[in-house]
Image (spheres, grey):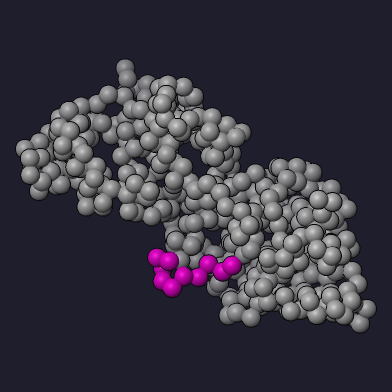
Amino acid sequence: MADDTFADLQKNFFAAFIQAVGYSIRQPALVVQPAPPIVGQDEDEADTLLWNYFNAIPPYTITANTTLTTGAQFLATYSAVMAALQSPPNNFESTIGEACFDGFNQALAAGTAQPTPIGYRNWAMLTKNCSSNAVAGASAYAAALLDPIFAGQNNVLPYKPVGKKSVDFAPGYKTMMKQLRNAPSRSANVSLSSSSAEYDKTWTGGSQSAVFGLWANSQSNTQISQKFASADVRLNVSFTNLLPFNATPGDWYTSSALGIAYSNKGNPPWVPTASKTWDNTFSDKGDLQRFTTSLLIANEMKLTYESVATFTSQEQSEIKSNSSAGLWPFYNSGGGSYSFTDVSFSTSGSMMVTTSTVKNTPTIVGAIIEPASQYLGFAAEVAKAQVARLRK
């Protein structure tokens, strides 16, 4: 494809945006497109919508279009890694026997038992042929859990895809909203040009995945999108509140276990016959190279920009008819109760766009990410020390 001027404009938008919200241009981060409101029918649904962003493994891009691209999921990938590791020998299974061991694992996956020593004791007391080893099994279970890998494999069992529990992080939506209302305001005025190469300084050097054109679900290389991007764009954006929201994985995640997996490439801890390996997990071709550590969540966003490009009357009509789908850069759909988009044209044909979101309607506009070396570095060192103590 020929040079995509609109894609270059988007790259420069990221470079300007990440600095406008207080970060270095080299900060590993991305802009999220489109940016729908995080609004659920109830708190549980709102939690799920919020946590899905943390569960998505960030690709190597400065623009993540969640409609055009799909990637690996944190929980599913992590679960596969745990299944590919081998923990040191323990006497939990030998203490309770193969039948009770299999039965308990099935109960964990079904959600009818808790993955704790007390959980085993309570389950065994009510299970035929296992009640006699309920206490001894709980003690052996507690001893086995001192090993990080066994603990990691144990803690993820109740969660999908093996168990029934869905991914979770902490804190959730309710806490996020409290933090958002108290977050500081942010505003910026920038001039953008597709001819600039400011994006070269970003953490990917400007590499990005697929992007929309001027409106949602349009191609970036259409005539209208290219005309829009070929002229300078003057943009003003303000947020009543902008929150870098941090959340950590729930009980399914054992950082020390993943730290061991990351810091050891061979066998052990990796099972030599497993399909999941260090290379296809953590290398530059792996599916767990980086993690989302913060979401940039906006409250009451107002974004206004003017393009000095000249649009014909036919082009103006086409832009207006498609504006309800959401216009660049966040593609907030218009005509709803959570965000509004207005587009107008001067007598000379230049375009003015205003997009706003309503109060107390959180909108995710970006994410701060960390490479595995940083995210797991401390966990790896702690895990090494813990394993060394256990194996003396």
Direction top: furthest residue: 392
Residue 292's place in the image compared with 215, above or below, is: above
Tell me residue 35's x, y (percent): 62, 64
Residue 248's place in the image compared with 84, above or below, is: below
- Residue 65 located left or right of residue 134: right
- Residue 291 located left or right of residue 196: left
Q: Nearer the viewer, residue 243 or 195?
A: 195
How many discs appear? Answer: 0
Residue 219's place in the image compared with 109, above or below, is: below
Q: Residue at x 61, y 53 (%)?
A: 69
Q: Main secondary structure of the magenta part?
A: loop
Q: Residue at x 84, y 65 (%)?
A: 223
Tell me residue 42's x, y (percent): 41, 71
Q: Nearer the viewer, residue 71 or 383?
A: 71
Q: Nearer the viewer, residue 121 or 389?
A: 121
- The quarter in which the C terminus is drawn is top left
Residue 38's place in the image compared with 147, above or below, is: below
Q: Is residue 286 magenta?
A: no
Q: Residue at x 22, y 52 (%)?
A: 112
Residue 308 location, quadrant: bottom right
Q: Which residues are magenta?
A: 36-45
Direction front: furthest residue: 1
Residue 304 location, quadrant: bottom right
Tell me residue 11's x, y (percent): 76, 52
- Residue 176 located left or right of residue 226: left
Q: Residue at x 56, y 69 (%)?
A: 37
**Residue 246 visible in this rendered orientation of the protein:** no
Tell me residue 228's x, y (percent): 84, 66
